[in-house]
Image (tube, grey):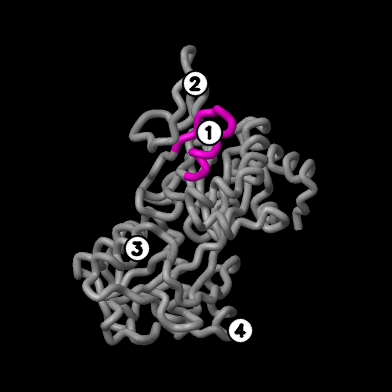
Amino acid sequence: MIRTFTAALAGATLFATATSAQTYSIGTNPQGSLFYATGTALSRVMVEETGKQFRVQPYAGSSTYMPLLNAGKLAFGMANVAEAAFAYSGTELYREALTNVRMVAATFGNVSGYAVRKDGDIRGIEDLKGKKVPVGYPSGRIFHFIAGAALATRGMTDKDLAGVPSPNFVSAAKLFMAGRADAAFLPVNAGITKQVNATVKGGIRFVKMGCEETDETKIKSWVSAAFIGKMSPSKTRPFIVEDPTCLIDVPFTLVAGKHVPDEIVYTLVKTMIANKAALAKSLGAFNRMDIKKGIARKHSMPHHPGAIKAYQELGIPQE
């Protein structure tokens, strides 16, 4: 049996043939995104530890593949907790409720913010007024809301920017690297953020937001599941300059179509928990995965029965 966790380029995303084992694909954002890196780590560990075939299936953005999960055309997908809530309720960026999608696990927090040139004159969110900044994100629409939450902390919207249309945050990063934008809204731990830092002359830094309770209230008015994430400078994050740098934290989750067999989801959850170290070796962000409690946290989207069974057996509370 051939073991694979490489990205599928075309064709069905959940399939079986008479001559091969069933393959389960994990929908992610484009290569270079943290979703892609997360899906790759999960696929690698599942293949190596269980012998089952998993692979990454990149799309233009999560709002592209979430409906595929709902339609039974994709097995798993990465989604931040805010998007999962929007998808299940059919609100904000979703015109209809995706009620066939189920929560599997919370993986780790994901902190994002506006990145600018380190030697530039943009020091605060308010300094973005009139600047060329990517907006829109039609294929990864959740970033419109998270970026909007950051602007809201200073009473701004994207109407206050000289907006540059961008389909997703990876494209936004490329616009920034090409000098066609003065800033870009980026996840701190995404691979492409490191690429941006290495490409932009003099490097980049993240613009800090306010750290007060009033700032978090404004953030939650845009994304109710978001909260303030405080970052400190480190050797691995040279673009975090001020201590603390307050940004927006929206945790990542793994979701599945309800059509995926309970046994598969059950095995995936137990394998994730038993192999946290292997996941972290593949992607350091997994060091932040809380396998004692946070991984099973309840959401507005109900959990898959296979995940519930695994958490109950392991004694992990769902609160």
Residue 194 visible: yes
Q: Magenta stretch?
A: 41-55
How far apart, in angstroms, are the residues tagged by discs 1 and 3? 28 Å
How far apart, in angstroms, are the residues tagged by discs 3 and 4? 30 Å
Residue linked to disc 1? 48
Kind of residue at disc 4: Glu
Residue 145 place in picture, x, y as percent: 46, 67
Determine whether the residue tagged by mark 2 lies in a helix, strand or loop: strand
Quadrant, the C terminus: bottom right
| Foreground of the two, 12 or 294 | 294
In the drawing, what numbered circle is on residue 16?
2
Q: Nearer the viewer, mark 3 or mark 4?
A: 3
Q: Residues within 10 Å of mark 1 (few under 14, many from 20)?
A: some
How far apart, in angstroms, are the residues tagged by discs 2 and 4? 51 Å
Q: Nearer the viewer, mark 1 or mark 3?
A: 1
Q: Are marks 1 and 3 in contact (CB under 8 Å)?
A: no
As drawn, the residue found furthest toward the left would be 179
In the drawing, what numbered circle is on residue 194?
3
